[in-house]
Amino acid sequence: MYPSSFEYHAPTDVQEAVDLLVEHGDRDVELIAGGHSLLPTMKSGLSKPEVVVDIADIDQLHGVDHGEESSRVGAMTTYATVAADETLARSTVISEAAAEIGDVQVRNVGTVGGNVAHADPAADLPAAVLVSDATVRLQGPSGDRSVPAAEFFQAMFTTDIREDELLTGIDLSHLGENDAGAYVKKPSPSSGYALVGVAVVLETDGETIMDARIGANGAFDHAMRLKPVEETLTGEALDGGIAHRAAGHATDDVEPYLLMEDDTASSDFRAHLLEVYTERAIDTAIERVGSMTDTEAD
Ligand SMILES: Cc1cc2nc3c(=O)[nH]c(=O)nc-3n(C[C@H](O)[C@H](O)[C@H](O)COP(=O)(O)OP(=O)(O)OC[C@H]3O[C@@H](n4cnc5c(N)ncnc54)[C@H](O)[C@@H]3O)c2cc1C
């Protein structure tokens, strides 16, 4: 199907994009980034924006800047760029999650900002963002604001972004010397999206887990931290079957209605997958302790 007609704008800086959102605030406006989620909904008639603001030509939104303790990933940065970035790969779990998305065509066009702003429950990046102690950066008519990832994802396809704001980038904390992380995923056999995806960051002193952050997507109506699993891991030694014991708490705090249920997997099966993939992700991170952040010295 053809999309319904719309007015098209292609700003070249962030302020111009914000001005367009404000100017057309009384109309149905959509930003377009990679277009991989928006265009199918426009073609099927589910979305009929009157105004489309294309942010692809805004140079400020492209690329990754590395600092000492964190990296800033611009909203228009593609998954392929993130997956290939060596600093991100050894200091965060977002590269591993980006490498799991779709196929090479999707990874060359889909953007970090689009993935996170769209907040599809089955998208891969939200869990990785949640465990990276990340801050989502938004710009609107009153300027910049930063939202902790834990407050950003609110419900299915729902985030803290206001109608007159765009997501400009994400700041991701780097892993420390003895820390490690992992992202593992059970892809849907039909779409490749995450039936369940689990991201893990373990902060350790080399022997004991000092702090743990576990995030899941696919299982629930939006990406969430698994607090009971994190609490079980904290203070435990890096051996002795702790992954299995902790993963058993994956759904402890979750209201049953939040578990996804559809043609590809029942909520019971997803709960089972969540435990299995949580255990795998923790085990993978434990195996990597001491080997992730020293790659630069090799
Ligand atoms: C065949 C196929 C397979 C896929 N497989 C996977 C998969 O395995 N895992 C996965 O995670 N995803 C998958 N996707 C989804 C893909 O990653 C999408 O590209 C992504 O969800 C949205 O990113 P986008 O850049 O295409 O955003 P768009 O489609 O351009 O935009 C999506 C929504 O986000 C809004 N938006 C975009 N950028 C911003 C911004 N900077 N600020 C505020 N709002 C913004 C838009 O207005 C729109 O409402 C797949 C897609 C396809 C077509």
Image (spheres, grey):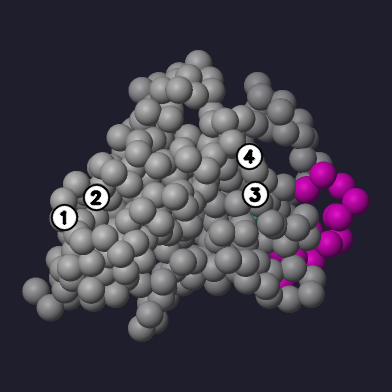
- Region in magenta: 14-29
Is residue 59 at all visible to an observer of this figure?
no
**Mark 1 vs mark 4: which is more N-terminal?**
4
**Mark 3 vs mark 2: which is more N-terminal?**
3
Q: Is residue 55 rendered to the left or right of residue 134?
A: right
Query: Residue 284 location in percent, x, y?
Result: 21, 50
Check disc 2 and report its element: helix, strand or loop: helix
The chief SS type of the magenta part is helix
- The crowding category of the residue bearing disc 4, from other C-alpha atoms within 10 Å (few below 14, some 14 to 19, many at least 20), is some
Give 236 or 39, whichever is nearer the viewer.
Answer: 236
User: What label does residue 156 carry, if any?
Assistant: 4
- Which residue does the image show at 36% across and 30% down from the upper left? 273
Q: Is residue 49 above or below residue 180?
A: above
- The crowding category of the residue bearing disc 2, from other C-alpha atoms within 10 Å (few below 14, some 14 to 19, many at least 20), is some
* Tag 3 residue: 154
* Tag 2 residue: 242
Give 121 or 164, whichever is nearer the viewer.
Answer: 121
Badge nearest the viewer, 1 or 4 = 1
